Amino acid sequence: MAEHILHPVILKKLARQWLNEDTSSFDFAGAAVGEHATTTEILCKSAGIIAGIPFANAVFKELNCNVEWFVSEGSFLEGSSKVASVSGKSRHVLLAERPVLNCLARCSGIATITNTQRKILDNKKWNGFLACTRKTTPGFRLPEKYAVLIGGACNHRFDLSQEIMLKDNHIKIAGSVKAELHEVAKQLKIEYPTILIEGSGGVNEDNIADYAGPHIDIISTSSTVQGYRTLDFSMNVCC
């Protein structure tokens, strides 16, 4: 399970960071509702793949809220789906609401677009790796990279210390690299059969199939973690 790669200490740190960001001082609305017990439900109002449950759980845990999920991480949701029931002190449930919904909306949007692109490649019978790039939201890289895994792709490098990669600015400084992707990939594989070859640059749902070829091992794209459409989640009080 992909959620098992998430370190519990890091989850706790992120949850506290998000809660502090959303309520850095006095919670006036929370004071008005008080601490009597309440139950709410989380609804997903658009179709897609749900992701981000471990992060939501971490937020609820910080506020001593109990949550029951009616769906599993990575499952496909139809529109107007009830995904969870949350109970706890009224002001604690409301403190959790926005960080939880933000995380679910973004992670689910990423998982959905990633899964769409992976299916396009599968339909072309391309068995290489679809990977995301480092063009993530500052401070939100871990949830976004995690959501890509839930959508069925893999992570590229998490930071600059992982893997050597020459990009446009490196090429301008060092010289030039010939373009014509598939022909060059073929020649490289003949000369160096064990290397991994990556296709990248402006990859999206409309052109991703063009990058898939017998000599391309990895297709990387930032479209899964940048400019994605979020899923619409809400939280409604039941009692």
Image (cartoon, helix red, strand yellow):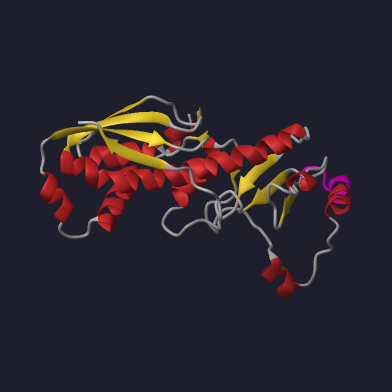
Q: Is residue 27 left or right of residue 85?
A: left
Q: Is residue 108 magenta?
A: no
Please state the horizontal and vertical placement of residue 113, each as a whole percent of the image.
59, 43
Please state the horizontal and vertical placement of residue 72, each as a whole percent of the image.
44, 26
Q: Quadrant of residue 218?
A: top right
Res 153 seen here: no
Q: Nearer the viewer, residue 103 or 129?
A: 103
Stretch in magenta: 188-194
Q: Quadrant of residue 115?
A: top right
Q: Is residue 133 above or below residue 6?
A: below
As drawn, the residue found furthest toward the top would be: 70
Q: Is residue 5 left or right of residue 61?
A: right
Q: Is residue 95 above or below residue 124?
A: below
Residue at 16% from the left image edge and 49% from the top image edge: 30
Q: Nearer the viewer, residue 36 or 80?
A: 80
Q: Is residue 170 above or below residue 189?
A: below
Q: Is residue 195 left or right of residue 32?
A: right
Residue at 44% from the left image edge and 43% from the top image edge: 232
